[in-house]
Amino acid sequence: MGSWSGARSGQSPSPRPRPPREVVQRGDFRIVSTRSTSLVLDGKVAMITGASSGIGAAAARLFAREGAAVVLTARRDERLRALVEEIGEAGGRALAVAADITSASDVERVVRAGVDRFGRLDCAFNNAGFATAGTELHETAQDVYEQTMDVNVRGVWNCLRFQIPEMLRNGGGAIVNTSSVAGQRATGASAAYVAAKHAVLGLTRAAAAEYGQRGIRVNALVVGSTRTEMMDQVVRDVPRLERQFEEETLQKRMADPTEVAQAAVWLCGDRSSFVTGAAMPVDGGTTAA
């Protein structure tokens, strides 16, 4: 069914001593993460999609480090298994279930595997996405349009449909969906991607409204340009876009995946208990400019 790593089934490993902060160097910029003495997601069970690379992989590591048992899914099974092993070696608990989120039956299988292993589902980070370099609408291939909508919209829809019932059984939960600056305005990305990420915000707000009184919070991240494998492919295809993306932010750089993951951790944790239906910018000020 999947690859599993962690302490004995049903038990959380004892937290290992950790330094008070983490510093990541990105060119001329230093990203400092200050850690409190308590774990943000201690004892929670989280599902993360698109977990084999980029923001999803960064989130998998961070969620586990903050105390969550993580259910990781993506299409690339070998990468998932390697990540599960890494998390287990660091003292965390993780389960890998390879799946295609555009398939409702696959998503149902992932949710069921996570609940069978860890007993429940408390939170989810629906992060998997697909994008290509911007192409004018009339020149966009039909298969590109369909894949863009399938992964970014149908994928989130499928996840919500199967995550929400588990959270209702538990009396509540928290869900974070990954949208984009392109979900708030036309950015030069493909029209299909702009439409898809607008739809993610619509699904987020609708779900937040429907389930707010039943203890489920649903929020979205409005993510700016981020140094991921997918972004690397885009700038390889159109090199001029790298400088353009950097110049669009007030900080004149792209995000590190961990910076986006930090926002997802906060929204999935109890410290954001009065936040729902929000579109939270993690874009270096792009939408403020």
Image: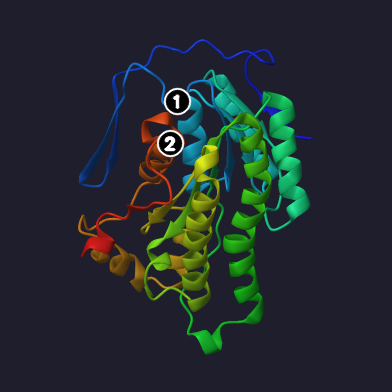
Type of amino acid at the residue the image marks with label 2: Val
Q: Against 69, is 245 above or below?
A: below
Q: Left or right of 89: which side holds 133?
A: left
The quarter of the image holding the N terminus is top right
Rounded to the nearest angstrom, the CA distance separating label 1 from label 2 is 8 Å
Q: Picture coordinates of residue 112 (x, y %)?
A: 74, 36
The crowd level at tag 1 (other Cα within 10 Å; few <14, some 14-19, many 20+) is many
Toward the bottom, the furthest residue is 138
Q: Is residue 126 left or right of residue 115?
A: left
Q: Position of residue 164 (x, y in %)?
A: 63, 43
Q: What's the colour scheme?
A: rainbow
With respect to residue 267, does 155 lie above or below? below
Residue at the spot x=46%, y=71% of the render? 194
Picture layout, residue 247 above or below residue 6:
below
**Kind of element beneath mark 1:** loop
Task: Check contact, mark 1 vs mark 2: CB within 8 A.
Answer: yes
Task: Kindly identify the residue that appears in the image at 54 percent across and 26 percent down.
Answer: 44
Name the residue: 70% across, 39% down.
Answer: 111
Residue toward you, 278 or 236: 278
**Numbered label tally:** 2
> Quadrant where the C terminus lies?
bottom left
Q: Secondary structure at mark 2?
A: helix
Residue placed under numbered mark 1 in the picture = 66
Q: Which mark is residue 265?
A: 2
Q: Quadrant of residue 71?
A: top right
Can residue 229 be seen?
no
Residue at the spot 39% in from the left edge and 56% down from the top edge: 222
Query: Does residue 262 show up?
Result: yes
Q: Quadrant of residue 267?
A: top left
Q: Position of residue 278 (x, y in %)?
A: 39, 51
Locate residue 225, reporting x and y percent.
Answer: 37, 59
Q: Amino acid at mark 1?
A: Glu
